[in-house]
Amino acid sequence: MKRTIKYLLVSAFLFAAACNEDKGNYDYTPVNAIAIGGIDDVYNVKSLDVLTISPVLDFSAGEAEEDCTYEWIRMRGTAQELVSTERDLELEITGLFAHPGDYSMRYRVKNETSGVVYTHKFTIRTTTLFTQGFLLLCQRGDDAALDMLALPADGGEQLFRDVHLLPGDGERLDLSNRKAVDIMAYRDAFSPSLTYSGKAGANYAIWILTDKNCDRVNSSDFSWKPEYNISNMVSRESKLSGNIVPTRMDAAGATTPNARLTLFMIDGNWYSYSNDSWGTWLINMHHNQMSAWDAMSEWDGELLGTFPVSPYFAARHDRGVFFFDESAHKIVIKPTSIIWNYGMGDMATSMYCINIPYIINWEWGMTDYDYEFDNPAHDLVYMSNCYAAADNPNPYSANANLMWAVVRDNDRGIYRLLDFQIVSPLGDAEKFGVTDFAFDEIGRARFFGRMDFGYLYYVTPDHRVKSVSTTSPNAMPQDISEGIVPAGHEVVVFKKFRDLKQFSDQSVVDPVNMRDMIYVVTRDPSLPDDRCCTLALYYCPANTLDGKLQIATYKYTEKDAGGRNVASTKEMRFSGLGNVVAVTPKEM
């Protein structure tokens, strides 16, 4: 113990002596601290904008930027992505920043002399011009092209050409040397945008069909990958192989962007795709991906094989699909493949088309209308859905699940409009009405459209738009082309869409009927292909007596001279478009 104390005393003495000899002759270099300013907390930008940030650097011991290095960092959770090493940021809002959302950013300045790093945090908040509007599949000479007519919330629609070529996270879809055929956009639980879950565009698919390929593209930036091609999406059990190119595609009658069932016509047969989480309950036993690609137009498997099917169908995704067997001249149904027997609690399957089990529901007072689903004298002209209102508790009321077909009755020499519904997953159907037309023009119609029980619309070979009452006996068509088809124009698209939520939630001329609209694209052949088409949206006013269509409007917000928000209304008619072949609404 005494020895330990002795050593401690010696140490203390030496330390004190050293301190006494320290004359304080050190050369101190003060740190040139940097204060970062001139950067906002949040930058609100839109896709395709160019964001410029010029920070203000304040040095405590005099300007010394030549001694500094710079980094602009995007944070992705704990990961960091280097965006730029320039002092100032000039950032085009594409690629990593094209998807709507908030992006956490860091600006770092390192004093290389002292090694000290100074950081400033901020946020880039991206909104996209491509969230809401209309996708236009166009033909430019030998090439197909994808344009978008954007409708931002502040009005001032903008036309973006060749959006499929915009820079993005993935590759770009090659549409050169292709003939445009069709386009669809709707909610899809297995869309390419799932990577960006939580941002607008997730769970949303854009299908593009040309004469050489059928692909999906990302709805946020229109990027593409090889796995988005339909040929790479089928199950390994598929009977199809190679480059699969449908000739037609449709989504539950193409009446709604919320469709849960998509059909593709390949080699004369319809094949199906389930596009939401209910897929395991849908036709052909989908398991959250493409089906096994067995033809839907099939009788009892190997026993009878497939039948020649018409290019039109009507469907309710949770109950079944109506097809027309062109060899037997009859409407048939393929019920949902997995169903619960009524009151039994066990599972039953129906993998093949069946003759329609027609029923008369006396509870609702329905009558046996004068037509048969299997009349050998019938030839199909057109078939589709009128409504598919899944939220309507009464399937027999207006706005119910009406399906319809226009057929030629060769025995009577007339055309007939058949209204019917599917009332159970067993395939039971119920007749809802029939209208006879004693004029032949309807059999030559180029397009059909229907929004309610009152009127049927069609376009003649000479590009006239006509309406005909479906409730008046011996009704004759009325020409309603004035205001719809300008002189010298051709009608190239005439299609009904339903349930446009983004538009119908706003103030419009008629909010109820706004949910069902007919899209009309006309083309002026005298104009160049880059500005020859006009798109307009029409609806049928309530209680109309002549079936005339009225131009739809939408409401947007703009700022007045004082900077105040002012509500404005604009007609949904857009000219100066390219050579449009197909159009679809885009709402996400």
Image (cartoon, rainbow, N blue to C red):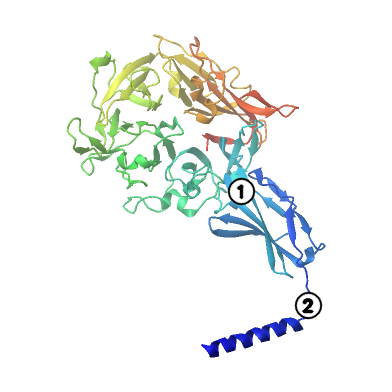
| Kind of residue at badge 1 | Leu
Q: From what the image shows, is residue 83 above or below residue 175? A: below
- Residue for badge 2: 26
Please tell me which residue lies in front, 518 or 511: 511
Instruction: Characterize the local packing of mark 2: few (<14), some (14-19) or many (20 or more) Cα atoms within 10 angstroms.
Output: few
Is 136 displayed left or right of 426 in the figure?
A: right
Q: Tell me residue 107's x, y (percent).
A: 67, 56
Secondary structure of the residue carrying tag 1 is loop
Q: From what the image shows, is residue 530 above or below residue 419? A: below
Q: Tell me residue 54's x, y (percent).
A: 75, 52
Q: Residue at x 50, y 18 (%)?
A: 540
Q: Tell me residue 536's x, y (percent).
A: 58, 26
Instruction: Say if mark 1 contacts mark 2, CB within 8 Å.
Output: no
Q: Between marks 1 and 2, how big is the CA–CA gap?
A: 61 Å
Is 421 displayed left or right of 546 in the figure?
A: left
Instruction: Characterize the local packing of mark 1: few (<14), some (14-19) or many (20 or more) Cα atoms within 10 angstroms.
Output: some
Is 349 displayed left or right of 275 in the figure?
A: left
| Kind of residue at badge 2 | Tyr
On the question of residue 580 being in view, the answer is yes
Of the two numbered discs 1 and 2 in the rendering, the one whose residue sits closer to the viewer = 2
- Residue for badge 1: 166
Residue 469, picture quadrant: top left
On the question of residue 409 being in view, the answer is no
As drawn, the residue found furthest toward the right would be 62
Secondary structure of the residue carrying tag 2 is loop
